[in-house]
Image (cartoon, grey):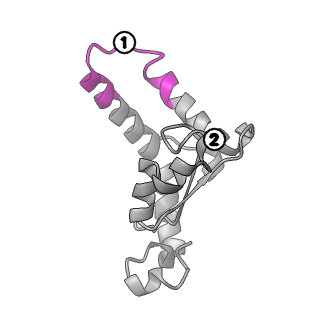
Amino acid sequence: MPYTIHTVLTDNGIQFGNALQHRSGPTARHRRHMFDRICLEHGIEHRFTKPNHPWTNGQVERMNRTIKEATVRRYHYATHQQLRSHLAAFLDAYNFARRLKTLNGLTPYGAICKAACTEPQRFSRDPAHLTTGLNT
């Protein structure tokens, strides 16, 4: 989608940053974590959730649970490619066919189409539009 990503909120996992106790140490000040370097290259602000606040990333965890329940907890895959294919099929079904209460009975794709019709300025690819702050 033509959205500009300006901020990423992640949990405190080591895949997103140095260990919490080492983030302000001398090494961390001179050598950034790879995830932080990539964010910096793309002009994206990286924020961490507060430790011991699991409700902050509860929606992500719930979606991860939904995906696991539909794939690896239900089926055995002989190859990684089988898992990838089934995961792609599940995500297509979820995004284009599954109607969600939180979206007033629309599919995720339907909700995006509705938003594009009612608020077309949010979907503009015009670079001048992106600097006006309307895309936030």
Residue 20's mark?
2
Q: Position of residue 35 (x, y in %)?
A: 44, 50
Most extreme residue toward the front is: 26
Q: Is residue 11 visible?
A: no
Q: Amino acid at mark 2?
A: Leu
Q: Nearer the viewer, residue 52 or 88?
A: 52
Q: Position of residue 6 (x, y in %)?
A: 51, 66
N-term-proximal mark, 2 vs 1? 2
Q: Amino acid at mark 1?
A: His
Q: Residues within 10 Å of mark 2 (few under 14, many from 20)?
A: few
* Eye-nearest disc, 2 or 1: 2
107 to the left or right of 12: left
Q: Residue at x 41, y 49 (%)?
A: 34
Eyeballing the image, is 131 above or below 115? below
Q: Give the Cα distance between marks 2 and 1.
A: 36 Å
Q: Is residue 131 visible?
A: yes
> Regarding mark 2 in the picture, which secondary structure is present there?
helix
> Regarding mark 1 in the picture, which secondary structure is present there?
loop
Q: Which residues are magenta?
A: 67-86
Eyeballing the image, is 97 above or below 65? below
Asked if the stretch drawn in magenta spans residue 77, the answer is yes
